[in-house]
Amino acid sequence: MPHQVLMPHLSDTTEEGIVVAWFVEPGATVREGDLVAEVQVEKMSAEVHAPVGGRIGELRIAPGGVVAQGALLVVIEAAAGGEAHAAAAEAAAPAAVAAEPGGPASPAARRLARELAVDLATVVGTGPGGRIVESDIRDAADRLPGGGGAPPASQGRLQPLTPMRRTIAERLLQGLASTAQLTLTAEADVTALGEHLERLTAECGRRVSYTEAVLRACALALGEHPRVGARWTEEGLILPERIDIGVAVALDDGLVVPVVRDADSKSLEVIGREIADLAERARAAQLATSETEGGIFSVTNLGAYGIDAFTPLLNPPQTAILGLGRARPRPAVVAGAVVVRTLMVLSLTFDHRVLDGAPAAAFLATVVGLLQEPERVTAGG
């Protein structure tokens, strides 16, 4: 009997997702639990597995195609009785077939063929069942005139856009088009904070970072300046009932912003461990969609890359985001004398529709003040 495989529901904030890749071909035999496809909604990826064993029918969406959550992806004609055992055996052991050009190709091989301008119809597969794999594509590319199949140097090498890259681009463009973004900068003297964090690092056996300290300072400041965490709607501003703050995590081809919940009520140690856990699972694509939703404010840090200051862009529908530059020794005037202090530039980008310059500046001044009194930030940490 036929069994429908549907696009999983991964997000409540959007209706559609993308089929990243198929791992089966029409007519192929699969076992229950076999990997069928990889899909993505916004920045969250998920694997789709066969709910039953049987034969794969028509693939309803091409790789890279847009599909609504809950829509049909493919039908599996489930085997019954002895047929099920035969199907399992066929899926477990690839059939012996004559290797001919133009056989089935893995999704990775198809992507590589596009990049290297290799015609799949000319490639003989060496994988199971004559399947074309990446090494076959590279071998075929080496045999092309010029030894690589790449476009002429004047054109450059085409790198196809990933679904995540497309999603980030679309969201940033939408955010810029629908908000009035303005950035304020301030310099914080974090000399005492840096010394305090070093002591905590030695005491607790883990690296205590500026990111977690700044996130906690922002959480405390948002309690004094709730308008910074408000959200614009056409009916009015929605003020936050809780302080959930996102922290940007860089990935190989983009970034994701998991959220620390109730950050104002958590110690520095708890915040630090949550950030580390969220970042590790983000890089392993193991975050649930719910863990990236609902933030009222975000923090992003480029200090590790040697950046002193930058203009962060809003993470819609949030009203503000704080960018951290690197903390480094610089000359500063203290009590009329030039001394060396550890300084950090903070850049606050905000939506001018929600906030005017003065309240935004007041929030930023509160954050700076907290960072310059490390006991307030690290209390209980």
Image (tube, grey):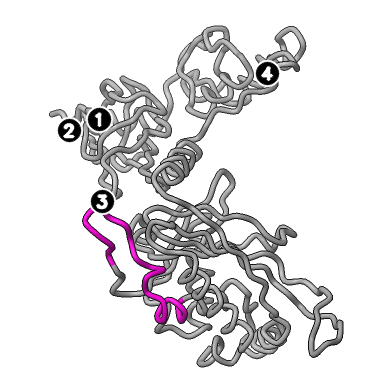
Which label lies toward us, 3 or 1? 3
| Residue 250, quarter of the rendered image | bottom right
Q: For numbered disc 3, what is the local secondary structure?
A: loop
Q: Which residue is mark 4?
A: 139
| Residue 70, quarter of the rendered image | top left
Q: Nearer the viewer, residue 211 or 353?
A: 353
Label of residue 54 in the image: 1
Q: Amino acid at mark 3?
A: Asp
Q: Residues within 10 Å of mark 3 (few under 14, many from 20)?
A: few
Query: Is residue 159 shown above or below 122?
Result: below
- Please say whether residue 186 is one of the residues in the magenta stretch: no
Q: Amino acid at mark 1?
A: Gly
Q: Are marks 2 and 1 in contact (CB under 8 Å)?
A: yes
Q: Nearer the viewer, residue 150 or 296?
A: 296
Q: Which residue is mark 2?
A: 3
Q: Are marks 3 and 1 in contact (CB under 8 Å)?
A: no
- Label 3 vs label 4: CA separation? 44 Å
Q: Earlier in the sequence, mark 1 or mark 4?
A: 1
Label of residue 12 in the image: 3
* Left or right, residue 3 beside residue 158: left
Which label lies toward us, 1 or 4? 4
Q: Amino acid at mark 4?
A: Asp
> Which residue occupies 53% across, 12% down?
120
- Label 2 vs label 1: CA separation? 9 Å
